Image (cartoon, rainbow, N blue to C red):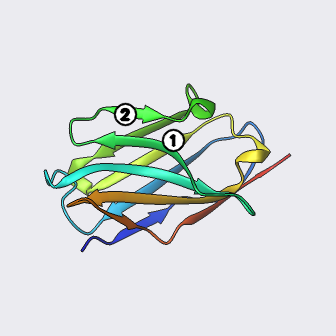
Amino acid sequence: QVQLVESGGGLVQAGGSLRLSCTASISITDLNINFMAWYRQAPGKQRELVATITNGGHTTYTDVVKGRFTISRDNSKNTVYLEMNSLKPEETAVYYCSARYWLTDYWGQGTQVTVSS
């Protein structure tokens, strides 16, 4: 079992920045964690993958956030971050942290990000 706790959401104006944090209940260097990721779900839309990071630090991003968002990790704190810059109103959503551990996906409770125009 893995518990994930997100924080850092809030209200920001378009063009602004936020940093989300996701702290895991286990060591994120555990080799049984395939990857950790951030997803988001806007009202009335399906949950979408935003970014991933592996144990080795390899990162991937969905095209619409490339160059603006950065996923990173602090192994000493068992925490994964999502730095979001140049935010757009259409990126208003609940942002979820996820960990694939032993091929099972675990989810946090989500943190609301609201971008005002």
Q: How many marks?
A: 2
Left or right of 76 in this view: 100: right
Amino acid tagged 2: Thr
Q: Residue at x 22, y 42 (%)?
A: 55
Mark 1 surroundings: few (<14), some (14-19) or many (≥20) residues within 10 A: some
Left or right of 44 in this view: 113: left
> Disc 1 on helix, strand or loop?
strand
**Above or below — where is 65 with respect to 23?**
above
Q: Residue furthest top?
A: 67
Q: Residue furthest left?
A: 31
Mark 2 = which residue? Answer: 59
Using the image as rendered, state which of residue 32 and residue 76 is in the foreground: 32
> Disc 2 on helix, strand or loop?
strand
Mark 2 surroundings: few (<14), some (14-19) or many (≥20) residues within 10 A: some
Residue 32 disc label: none
**Quarter of the figure with the N terminus:** bottom left
Q: Residue at x 63, y 42 (%)?
A: 17
Residue 62 picture location, percent across and down: 54, 35
**Above or below — where is 2 with respect to 68?**
below
Residue 39 picture location, percent across and down: 52, 53
Mark 1 = which residue? Answer: 83
Residue 104 picture location, percent across and down: 29, 64
**Quarter of the figure with the C terminus:** top right
Amino acid tagged 1: Glu
Asked if disc 2 and disc 1 are in contact, CB closer than 8 Å, the reply is no
The part of the image, by quadrant, that contains residue 8 is: bottom right
Q: CA distance from mark 2 to mark 1?
A: 13 Å
Q: Earlier in the sequence, mark 2 or mark 1?
A: 2
